[in-house]
Amino acid sequence: MRSKTRRTAAALAVFAGLATAVTGEATAEHGGIPFNATALLALSDVDTRAQAYVDDNIGPAIRATDTLTAIWRGGRTDVAVSNSVWGPPTTFAVTPDASHAVVLEVKRQREPGDQSFEDDLEFSTTIAVVDLRGGKPRVVQRTDTGGFAAHSLAISPRGDYVVVANWAAPGEDTGIPEGQGRQLSLIPLRDGRLGAPQLFGLNDIPGPFVYPNTVAWHPSGEFLAVTIGPRNLVAFYRLTGGKLQPWGQPVAAGQFPFPGRWTPDGRLFVTASMEWDEPAVSDRNSPPGSLYSVRFDTDATKEVRHEVIRGARTGINPEGLAISPDGKHVVTVNMRYSHLPEGFDALRPPTTSSITLAELDRDTGATKVAGEYPFDGILPEGVVFDRTGEHLAVAVFDFNGAKAGRGAVQFWRLHRGQHPRLEQLPHRDHNAPRHPLIGRDPVIPGGPRTRRGPPQSGFMTGPRTLLLIHSPLVGPTTWQPTAEVLRGKGYRVHVPTMTATGRPYHEKLIRAATIDEPVIAVGHSGAGALLPAIADTAIFVDALLPHPGQSWFDIAPPPAQAQLRGLATEGELPPWHEWFAPEDLPLPDGPLRTQFLAEIPRLPLA
């Protein structure tokens, strides 16, 4: 077990920032800088120095306990909760309704006399739930993940499951037989309480070192992405009946893919390859990283094949990654060699870190670097956009200028346009807790109602979550351009996919509507007839009105019924676009048309 511990501690020198921005209801200002959000949540690990990943010396304790900090407009609140910077920048997340945060301990809290990062700070399987409501965070549950070295988690878009990545892979160093891995814990989450974990192995991937790094839910909540750095793979799984099943073959994505995020429309999974090749190349001597996009295949009518697109180069050691709400920009936070002790390597001084800004083609998955921006900071990692996509928050573990063991949250502005660029905003407050880790997902704790525009705009009441439901005749691509515009205006938007599997449309619709927050259902075409059954508030977009006791075929005009009967074969209609001449489809050739046509299902006549 010790040999494994040495390997993983060196391979995953993940040191700081988890950024969870807090979008939605009000504007948080930190040091006078606007960030269009209700608050920022930051974990602080007081157990170790940044350089302990290299020299194993955790140094003196700065404070007695680790904390979760909520930085609100006008103040901040802290709650003691044990956590660790070991692992990817995804050790905590927030529920979709922003009522609770879930935090992994990863490594136990230090005790008097502890000195070694590797030997004294033992791995943990503890997971905690923090109630965020009322502006007074408090721990309401501590339980066990059931795995080993639980170090990364994600909460499903519906808030009903937490998935945790464990280092319980088969191999000589773990003693786990081949085919009996338990690398993923799937834990139900109901009303702010975690249930009993189910353990799943990545047993579709044979061989050693199948250690997961980042886990990320698809926006639909139906699929899961897992980066497996030591094997240079990204794997995908589908949640079916409370079980995780492989979805297509794992794909190779560079050398040691580590952080990863879905685009808002779910068509792409973007990961940053660290370009590590242990033991010769690691975080201590690595070259610049690389971005890889995976075009995600949801078509279950054929063999599932995901396509990998190699993209732009990033800075060195890109352990943090975020995608803008409109899906047009990717940023990586690059710790470079900032975690190395002074004098460790004369060729790689621990002087600065950097942020890489890249443009993302949402149709092809191609990325292009717009700029790299050095800045003073030790082990920055957590990064998140605000809800407008105009500002970034970056968690910084420590600073070269002070090295006082106090981190901070820094802010950057994204200037869009033909030549996008980043601008670092004045850093006015270093009083954030030591080693802030900001969680990824936007959160909306209780407080004033949501603002929909810039900070100076007025308040609005009512739900800010939209459920865009496509017609049974087509697929979710019909809503994607609209969803991107709405997300850019600050709405939380769900576009469920209800054509990828054989489950009946109405069952998928009911499942998609199980969101624990006020929601407006927006239905197009044939989806309109079902809206009153799933939501109190509905918007009909060129949609059918309900006709109780009648199907859509029953209410069609007689000439249309006759036409459809003529098209049907053995009671099944051809795909919708084949009902008329190709030139009658008002959609130009290109990736959008291809995706649209690929989603169209075959349906029964009545």
Image (cartoon, helix red, strand yellow):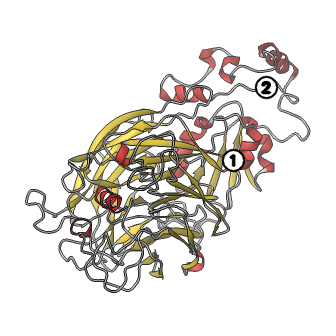
Question: Front-most of 4 and 531?
Answer: 4
Residue 293 in picture, x, y percent from top left? 40, 39
Nearer-N-terminus badge (2/1): 1
The quadrant of the picture occupied by the C terminus is top right
Residue 392 in picture, x, y percent from top left? 37, 60
Label 1 Cα crowd, 10 Å radius (few <14 / some 14-19 / many 20+): few
Q: Is residue 558 above or below residue 68?
A: above
Residue 138 in picture, x, y percent from top left? 55, 80
Asked whether residue 222 is in view, the answer is yes
Label 2 Cα crowd, 10 Å radius (few <14 / some 14-19 / many 20+): few
Residue 604, numbered circle: 2
* Image side of residue 274 versus residue 583, left or right: left
Residue 147 in picture, x, y percent from top left? 51, 61
Question: Front-most of 600 and 452?
Answer: 600
- Looking at the image, how many numbered discs can be counted on the residues? 2
Q: Is residue 358 above or below residue 100?
A: above
* Image side of residue 337 versus residue 292, left or right: left
Residue beneath the point at 49% across and 67% down: 125
The span from disc 2 to disc 1 (Cα, nearest Å) is 25 Å
Comparing labels 2 and 1, the label whose residue is closer to the camera = 1
* Image side of residue 549 versus residue 279, left or right: right
Q: Is residue 24 above or below residue 156?
A: below
Disc 1 marks which residue?
A: 241
* Image side of residue 404 versus residue 210, left or right: left
Q: Quadrant of residue 577?
A: top right
The quadrant of the picture occupied by the N terminus is bottom left
- The kind of residue on which mark 1 rests is Gly
Residue beneath the point at 77% across and 21% down: 572
Question: Front-most of 398 and 538?
Answer: 398
Mark 1 falls on what kind of element? loop
- The kind of residue on which mark 2 rests is Pro
Asked whether residue 360 is in view, the answer is no
